[in-house]
Amino acid sequence: MTASLSEHRPCAPGAPGMEVGVVPGPQPGTVQVVVRGEIDFDNATFLREVLLAALVSHRATLLVDLQRVTFCDCAGLNTLLTAHRAALRAGRGLRITAAGRRVERLLNLTGTRPLLS
């Protein structure tokens, strides 16, 4: 069962245009990260910090929901790939469980969708 976005911890003021929530995942050993808004050069660092902190503090596979992301540039993609590599090094995983049309297009155009599935 996935919590609604209103139940997630909102982002810090340092990430304009984006909200990130972290809650326990639907399966044991997982944590759900829900992102809403835009992932761009201005806030990708904040998202990377949240993803890496979730990896360390929860010691679980990250399930990333990008369904409500309205824009993602190469800085956002780099953030997701960096967190994916960190998860693999830690013996865990990072999977995108949902993505909107724009994010799916970016992942497909760059050939990175299989890495994050």
Image: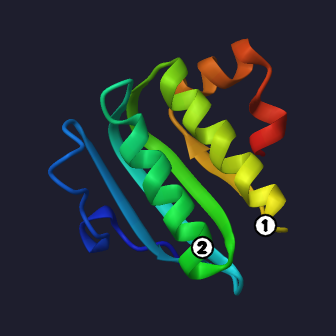
Res 49 visible: yes
Residue position marked by numbered label 2 in the rendering: 56
The answer to which image quadrant residue 71 occupies is top left
The answer to which image quadrant residue 26 occupies is bottom right
Which of 108/80 is in front?
80
Which of 51/96 is in front?
51
The answer to which image quadrant residue 55 occupies is bottom right
Instruction: Return the disc, 1 or 2, that comes first in the chain's sequence.
Output: 2
Q: Amino acid at mark 2?
A: Val
Give the class, few, some or many, for how many residues have Cα within 10 Å of label 2's Cα (few <14, many ≥20). few
13 lies above or below 28 = above
The reply, left or right, for residue 37 in relation to residue 3 is left
Q: Amino acid at mark 1?
A: Ala
Please state the total of marks drawn on the protein image.
2
Residue at 25% over, 56% down:
11
Q: Please state the horizontal and vertical placement of residue 117, each as a whole percent of the image.
A: 78, 45
111 lies above or below 70 = above
Which of 1/62 is in front?
62
Identify the disc placed on residue 31: none
The reply, left or right, for residue 117 in relation to residue 12 is right
- Toward the bottom, the furthest residue is 28
Q: Please state the horizontal and vertical placement of residue 62, each as a whole percent of the image.
A: 64, 64
Residue at 21% over, 36% down:
17
User: Disc 1 versus disc 2: distance between alpha carbons?
Assistant: 9 Å
Q: How is the image coloured?
A: rainbow
94 lies above or below 80 = below
Residue position marked by numbered label 1 in the rendering: 90
Residue at 28% over, 70% down:
9
Quick one: SS at disc 2?
helix
Quick one: SS at disc 1?
loop
105 lies above or below 23 = above
Tell me whether the residue at label 1 lies in contact with that at label 2, contact meaning CB atoms closer than 8 angstroms.
no
